Structures are given as structure tokens and as C-alpha cells.
Image: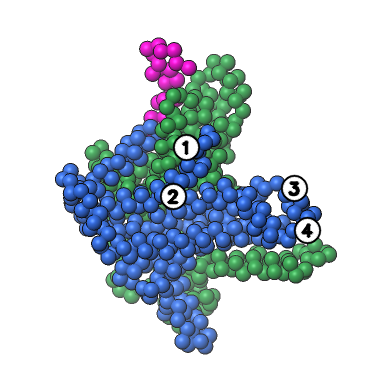
Amino acid sequence: MVEAVAGPAGPRPVRALSRRNIILYGTLIVIAIYYILPLYVMVVTSLKGMPEIRLGNIFSPPVEVTFQPWVKAWAQACTGLNCDGLSRGFWNSVVITVPSVVLSIVIASVNGYALANWRFRGANIFFTILIFGAFIPYQVMIYPLVIILREIGLYGKLPGLVLVHTIFGMPILTLLFRNYFTSIPEELFKAARVDGAGFWGIYFKIMLPMSLPIFVVAMILQITGIWNDFLFGVIYTKPEAYPMTVQLNNIVKSVQGVQEYNVNMAATILTGLVPLIVYFVSGKLFVRGIAAGAVKG
Amino acid sequence: MSNGRPNQIFRNLNAKVAAIPMIATASVVFVGGTVWTVYYSFTSSKLLPKAKFVGLDQYERLWSTNRWLVSIENLFIYGVFSLIFSLVIGFLLAALLDQKIRFENTFRTIFLYPFALSFIVTGLVWQWILNPDFGVQQVVRDLGWTSFTFDPLYNAEIVIYGVLIAGLWQGTGLIMCLMLAGLRGIDEDIWKAARVDGIPMWKTYLFIIIPMMRPVFITTLVIIASGIVRVYDLIVAQTSGGPGIASEVPAKYVYDAMFLKQNLGQGFAGSTMMLLSVLIVLIPWAYLEFGGKKHG
């Protein structure tokens, strides 16, 4: 992996090895190694057997590559009484993430569209509250939400957690969609109005097809965000429905028996794999997603 | 807009229906939930919320609890260092990437990928790397420096810095991206003018570029600050608050009080204090951003 960034390889003929470039690329490469190291250590550790881990050092590549830790992490690692590995948490996370992503994006996109093109009185007040709400510590709102969910019979159930993710994803997604829809030329909207298209007609026939990139950005944001969630998973679901992050933590923290660091690291990579794949596949869109989420338009 | 006709509510009805989830979230969960929690922080709620008022008792108890004081101290140390280092490292990385370098995308991808990982994954990896028997400490000792000691996760004095290392690894990529966007937003002519005037590069950055990027810095600051107050998963994964209570943070105090110790009142009081600390950052920011000129 380090080879991919091997310095100023293809030099511009004249002054590629100037002092400035050596310092510049040298610094960048050293920092890059620091950032890559944990991922490298994770992978290397997960491919070693326990005896080798006890003898060697964490940075050395495995002498004998074994995939046993991965198999064990996926299918046999124990949390409490369950010994069916991380696969349970993986599927729980899938079952949590898919509907949460879909529901939150549907609601936020329609809402952002209403805020951008169909302003009504009072809309901005609620929108401002919503954006400020994004900065309120979750801890202030988690217990009232427990009560609300209990009242409507969803506490500890999957739909409850989906609702929670939809609620807390709403500020950033609504902002994202509102800003995007605002940037679409108003003439288009007006022309459609003249042609007699209504609220939903314009949304489905004009806005939706024009804004696929922003939907992808929203999906990236939500998939990584919800997959990586720990707090809501631990509060609003029951142990058998815990998402992967919670189960991972429980597996690593379980005190029974000898610590198997290779299994722990294999489990850690497995949990990080989904957001990592999303990240590496989406590339620039990911950057755009977080920038859109972070810097207000 | 309005002409006072009775069907006022039904104008633009679809948009209002579409906004119902937002209205409900903003008013019921965000405002309602916050008010509810603050209100019940003045009660003696234990296992269940009860409206039996005890004034500031919960807060008195909170501020005389050692664990809370340690939590606040940790949050403060973590917060200050995290802010400074995030901004400095984030800006330096962005400035390095902004030198028209080759492989910019590769470097950016490398600096940013930890941000895609959860705090749980981050915490567990760094717990392993900082493990004194196998990790960095042992590796250096094996190289011959046998008295080398670096075990932040097992030393109550410095454990929070061990967490900081992990937190910075995970979060600086984001700051770099924000800063890079800010740098790219600066007019190329400024650079040309500075070069014509013979101003050295570091001076241009320090006295021209950074002041120009003030809005980016402020926004970034708010983002980092509101993230810091929430720090929870990272601690749970990396140290579980230990050794002892040395790396406890307020978010964990609140969670434990509410869901493990059946001491809701303490949880509410703690979360209200967290809210207060966010407001201290948020209100001046909102005033700077939205005060005076109309925005958004």
C-alpha cells in the first residue's frame, strides 16, 4: 500500500529533486505512513496465529498467513451466550442500515424540496431549529426519545431504531437537499408550474432525475454514519439485535478465556469493511458528502 | 402573501405535509426533548422520571462527584488539545496538499480514510497498537532500548492523551478537507500579488491567507467542538473509562447514570451541563454568523 505513494517518481525534468520537493514529499510520505500504519497493523495481526503474535512484533508481516482468525471472528466468536460470531451483528447492521438510509433520504429530500421551492410561512423557523438541533448533544435527547418510543410501542424494536436514525439524520440531509434544490434554476420550476405540474409531479419528473448525484452523496453519508453508530444501537435495541459495532465491542471486551488478538483484529476489520469499501469506491463523492454536511451552503 | 381567507392552512398543503417530519422532529424531539430533560434535571428521578422537585440538588451532587469532575477535566484537556491539534494538523496537511503536488488524490485518500471508520474500530485498533506487551512499547524495547516506556492506556496520568492520539488519527482528515476547500476558495491573484511583492510563503499564509479563511476556521471550530462534547464511543472502545476512572468523559457519565445505575436525575443534570457547554460555543457563533445580516 505504501508503494502506491512512492514519492516524486515521475519527475518533471528540470527541478524534480529540488530541496523543496524532497522536503515536501518526504513530509507527506512520513505522514501518510502514520495514517496507513493502523490499517496495516490490523490486517497483519489478523493474518497471524497467536503464537506468532506473542513472539513477534506487531509491525512485522505474518510468517505463516492464516485465515483462521477471520473465520472465527465471522462465525464463532462469542458474546455472552451467543457463539455465532460477528455474522449476526453484520446482518443486524444490514437490517438496521437499509431501511434507515431509505427512510431518512426519502423524508429529507421531500422536505428539502418543500423548503427550497414551496416555502410556506413558518418553514424557516423549524428549519433553523432543526439545524441548531444538530449541535445539541444527543445525551440531552436520548431519554425523552426512550419515553416517546415506549409510548408508541417501538422501544427496543427495529422500527424504533430506524426512526431514531431518521430523526438524527434529518438536519444534515435536509440541509444538503435544500441547498441542492435551491441551486437548480428557478425557471425550470416555474416552467413546470405553468405546464400544470403539481408538488409531486415536479418532484418526481424534474427534481429527482436532476439530482441523482446528491442522492448518492446522501446515501454515502447515511450508510457510513448509520453503520458506524454505536450509541443509538446500544440504547434502542435489544442484545440479540445489536448492530455490528456494539457486537464487535462486546466480542473484544468479553473477559472469558485468553484474549485472541488476531480474532479481535479480524473482527475489527470486518466491522470497518463496509464504510471503507463505500469510501474507496465513492472517492470524490465521499469528500463532497462530508464537505456538504460540514460547510453550510 | 396572505389575504386572510379561511383556507389559509390548505394553501401549499403538499409542502406542509412534506414538512411534517421536520416540524415534528424540530418541535417534539429537539425542543421538546431538550426542555423535558432540563426540566427533569431539577427532580429527584431515580429509576423512573418523577416530577418531584429538589431544586439544584442534582447539580450539587454532580459537582461533588469525583467521577464527574474527572470527566470534565478530561473533556477539557481532550477538547483543548483536540481543537488545537486538529486545526494545526488539518491546516498543515491542507497547505501541503495545496502545493500543486503529484498524487494529491492518493494522499488525500490516505489522510481521510480513518474518518470513514467508526470510533469503535478506531478505539480498538489504537488499543492494540498502544498495548504495552505487544505494541509500540514492546517493539521499541525489542530494538534494544529496554527501559522505553510508552503505555498511555495503562497510566492514569496520561491516558487521555492516548485517546487523543486515536481521536486525531480519526478526525484530522475531515479538518484537512474543510481547510483544503477553504484554501481552494482563495483567489489565485492573491498569491500572485504576494509573490510579486516578494512576501515569503509562510508569511503569506500566516498574515494573508489565514485571516481570509476566518469563516472556514470558525465553522470548523464549531464542528470540532460539538463533536468533542459527544466523545463517547472512542472511550468505550479504547479504555472503557479506565484505568479506574481516569479516562471518563461526561457523555459516558450520563449514559451510565441513565441506563446502568438507574439514576436518571444525575443523567439529566449531566446532559444539561453538556448542553450548556455546547451553547457557550454555539451562541457566539450563531451571533457572528447570523446576527446582523440575513442568511440562508
- Which element type, helix, strand or loop, lies under badge 4? loop
Which chain is assigned green? A
Numbered label attached to residue B108: none
Q: Chain of mark 1?
A: A
Q: Chain of mark 3?
A: B
The residue tagged 2 is: B281
Give the Cα separation between the discs numbered 2 and 1: 23 Å
Q: Of the residues shown, which amino acid type is indicated by label 4?
A: Gly
* Callout 3–callout 4 Cβ contact below 8 Å: no
**Residue B215 appears left or right of A14:** left
- Which element type, helix, strand or loop, lies under badge 1? helix
Judging depth in this view, the residue of A110 and A281 nearest the camera is A110
Label 2 packing within 10 angstroms: few (<14), some (14-19), many (20+):
some
Asked if residue B10 is among those painted magenta in the image, a careful observer would answer yes
The residue tagged 3 is: B189
Asked if residue B16 is among those painted magenta in the image, a careful observer would answer yes
**Residue A8, image x, y percentages:** 73, 65
- Which element type, helix, strand or loop, lies under badge 3? helix
Decide which of tag 3 and tag 4 comes sooner along the chain. Answer: 3
Decide which of tag 4 and tag 2 comes sooner along the chain. Answer: 4
Label 4 packing within 10 angstroms: few (<14), some (14-19), many (20+):
few
Considering every residue shown, the one lying at the far right of the view is: A14
**Residue B199 appears left or right of B239:** right
Q: Residue at x 55, y 26 (%)?
A: A205
**Residue B18, image x, y percentages:** 42, 28
Q: How is the image coloured?
A: by chain
Numbered label attached to residue B198: 4
**Residue A166 appears left or right of A10:** left
Q: Residue at x 72, y 69 (%)?
A: A22
* Callout 3–callout 1 Cβ contact below 8 Å: no
**Residue A10, image x, y percentages:** 76, 64
